[in-house]
Image (cartoon, rainbow, N blue to C red):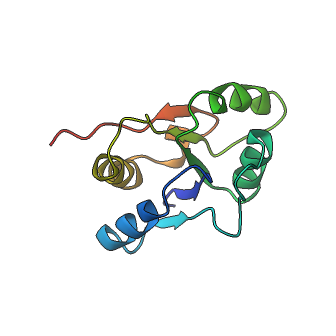
């Protein structure tokens, strides 16, 4: 089964458009209507986990700590952390690599940095 992704509210909505343009089959759900801006990190993690989706976020400062506390009580499909200096094109390439080469066990209960794709 392919990975399913959930965007945090801090992600640019153009990421979803760019991903779908490159790979229409990717299951990437934007935050609109699901995770309002200002939703506390523990609630964001709960929403993604309840829906069986890997959370994708640029909130690297606080999300990792919240994730470790979250993991003390339940399982998670995982979190992909995006460094703030990564360009939209780099993020899209990294997401496509994760989607096409990683499996659920590669991310389950882990917070991992999105890979940088050589190019």
* Residue at x 73% of width, y 30% of height: 66
Name the side, left or right, on which 43 lies relative to 25. right
x 80%, y 47%: residue: 43
Foreground of the two, 44 or 10: 10
Residue at figure coordinates x 56%, y 31% from the top left: 60
Task: Report the front residue among 111 and 32.
Answer: 32
x, y percent for residue 77: 63, 46
Q: In this image, 69 relative to 60: left or right?
A: right
Location of residue 27 with respect to 46 vertically, above or below: below
How far across and how far down the image is residue 97, in percent?
33, 49
Farthest residue toward the front?
A: 38
Image label count: 0
Q: Residue 79 appears in which quarter of the rendering?
A: top right
Q: Is residue 56 left or right of residue 41?
A: left
Task: Please report the residue visible at 48 percent of the width from the left and 56 percent of the height from the top.
Answer: 12
Image vertical order of residue 46 relative to residue 3, above or below: above
Indicate the quadrant containing the C terminus: top left, top right, bottom left or bottom right: top left
- Up-down: is 70 above or below 22? above
x, y percent for residue 5: 55, 57
């Amino acid at each position: 089964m392919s990975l399913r992704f959930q965007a945090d509210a801090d992600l640019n909505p153009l990421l979803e458009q760019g991903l779908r343009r490159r790979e229409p089959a990717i299951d990437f759900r934007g935050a609109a209507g699901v995770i309002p801006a200002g939703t506390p990190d523990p609630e964001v993690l709960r929403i993604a986990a309840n829906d069986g989706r890997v959370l994708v976020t640029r909130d690297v400062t606080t999300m990792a700590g919240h994730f470790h506390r979250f993991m003390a009580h339940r399982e998670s499909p995982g979190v992909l952390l995006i460094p703030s200096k990564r360009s939209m094109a780099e993020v899209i390439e990294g997401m496509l690599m994760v989607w096409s080469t990683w499996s659920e066990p590669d991310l389950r209960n882990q917070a991992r940095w999105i890979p940088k794709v050589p190019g």
